Amino acid sequence: MMRTIRLQREDFDAGAEQAALARGRPDIGALVAFTGICRGDGISAMTLEHYPGMAEEEIARHVEEAERRWSLKGVTIIHRFGRLVPGDNIVLVVTASAHRAAAFAAAEFLMDYLKTQAPFWKREERGDSASWVDAKAADDQAAERWNRRADAAE
């Protein structure tokens, strides 16, 4: 399985990353992509920080979990760090499979993990103030469903 995990300051081209994953791969029948973008609803900027090395290892661990749960042909995850402003790309998750159900489920699983458990810290700037952001209860609830599904399968 083709796997790409990158944490970077630089922007990414979502279309080029999808094309790179699928190029020359007749075994891929479905490609699902999610791009997270910095919103501007009162936020003038956000800063994302991570623990280098540990963050990549943790993301890889969850990609391996997705591979165990679904028949995947490839995964690309790119997560930016540093200061971002509204309209900037933040994260890209691309999953490839022979069939759409696996690609959709794996992309959603990986995004729920990145939103709630990945070792990133987010600081939002609003006007003259800045504050660190806690995980939202709704995001935690969305991610919890994957634990319930794993428990039910055993």
Image (tube, rainbow, N blue to C red):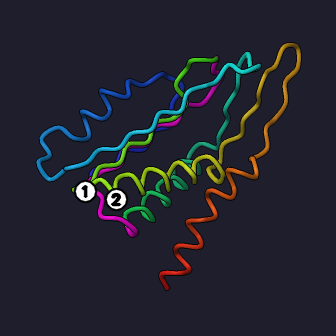
- Viewer-side residue, 14 vs 51: 14
Q: Which residues are magenta?
A: 68-85
* Residue located at (38% from left, 43% from top): 94
Determine crowd level at label 2: few under 14, some 14-19, many 20+ residues with C-alpha closer than 10 A: many
Which disc, if any, is residue 102? Answer: 2
Query: In the rendered image, which quarter is residue 101 located in?
Result: bottom left
- Viewer-side residue, 9 vs 52: 9
Give yes or no for contact between labels 1 and 2 (Cβ–Cβ under 8 Å): yes
Q: In the visual, does 15 lie left or right of 138?
A: left
Q: Secondary structure at mark 2?
A: helix
Query: In the rendered image, which quarter is residue 5 located in?
Result: top left
The residue where tag 1 is placed is 99
Amino acid tagged 2? Ala
Residue 84 belongs to magenta span:
yes
Locate residue 92, reporting x and y percent.
Answer: 45, 36
Q: State whether residue 69 is above or below residue 84.
A: below
Q: State whether residue 143 is above or below residue 26.
A: below
Residue 79 belongs to magenta span:
yes
Amino acid tagged 1? His
* Residue located at (61% from left, 25% from top): 38
- Viewer-side residue, 129 vs 150: 150
Locate residue 32, reporting x and y percent.
Answer: 35, 44
Q: Main secondary structure of the magenta part?
A: strand
* Residue located at (84% from left, 24% from top): 130
Q: In the visual, does 108 lie left or right of 26?
A: right
